[in-house]
Amino acid sequence: MFAGKTEEFIRSIRRYTYAQFNVLVFKPEIDNRYSDEKIVSHAGASVDAITINSSKEIDDKVRSIKEKVDVVAIDEVQFIDEGIVKVACDMADRGIIVVVNGLDTDFKADPFKNVDKFLVQAEYVKKLSAICRVCGGNANRTQRIVNGNPARKDEPIILVSGNDHYEARCRHCYIKPK
Ligand SMILES: [Zn+2]
């Protein structure tokens, strides 16, 4: 989070688009921070994306396209069902370039589903780090903050915005939720 991963994801998609590759971009429905039909970075870059509710929808869509699909890019893979790993690997086996974007750990510093498996399956991994909000060091953790304090493991989600947020922290400034 806050590491510019969406910016980097959009940049890699654009490289394939400029190269005249046939690119399909997907994102899970849950992610509607900025736009329903687009993936938008904090810096304002955007690409069109197909919103899906399951890994099967991606598989069906890609198989339904008559012309050759060169690249399939999938955002926020940690929020898609676990079938996505097999769907993506099968596409790669068929010669499609698959680019996935996701967070490696949640606010408890536990591995996110799917991303843990993609880290093993992928030929190339680009790991980005943010800047620690406390000390300015390299941040590879996400601290969930509720009412100004690090959240407990089981702290309920507060829907009133402003009382519940996330910040990037390094391993030294991160406080493991109890
Ligand atoms: Zn720090």
Image (tube, rainbow, N blue to C red):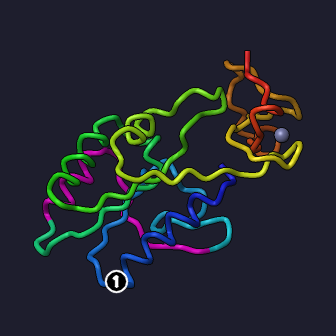
Residue farthest along the front direction in this orientation: 123
User: From the viewer's perspective, is residue 73 above or below residue 130?
Assistant: below
Which residue is at the far top?
178
In magenta segment, residue 46: yes
Residue type of the residue flagged with mark 1: Ala
Q: Position of residue 63 (x, y in %)?
A: 14, 59
Q: Alpha-carbon neighbours of circle 1 within 10 Å: few (<14), some, or many (≥20)?
A: few
The kind of secondary structure element at disc 1 is loop
Taking the magenta stretch, the answer to whether it contains residue 51 is yes
Q: Residue at x 45, y 67 (%)?
A: 37
Magenta segment boundaries in residue numbering: 45-64
Q: Residue at x 58, y 35 (%)?
A: 105
Q: Nearer the viewer, residue 60 or 17?
A: 17
Instruction: Give me the residue at 67% from left, 18% from top.
Output: 154
Q: Position of residue 45 (x, y in %)?
A: 59, 74
Q: What quarter of the picture does the C terminus occupy?
A: top right
Name the residue furthest left. 66
Give the left or right position of residue 41, taking residue 18 as reference.
right
Ligand 1's quadrant: top right
> In which quarter of the view is residue 163 placed?
top right
Does any atom of ligand 1 lie closer than 8 Å to the CB of label 1?
no
Q: Which residue is mark 1?
A: 19
Q: Position of residue 132 (x, y in %)?
A: 80, 46
Q: Is residue 8 above or below residue 176?
A: below
Q: Nearer the viewer, residue 111 or 125?
A: 125
Residue 70 placed where, x, y %?
23, 70
97 sits left or right of 95 in the view: right
Report the side of 126 relative to 152 (left or right): left
Q: How many marks?
A: 1
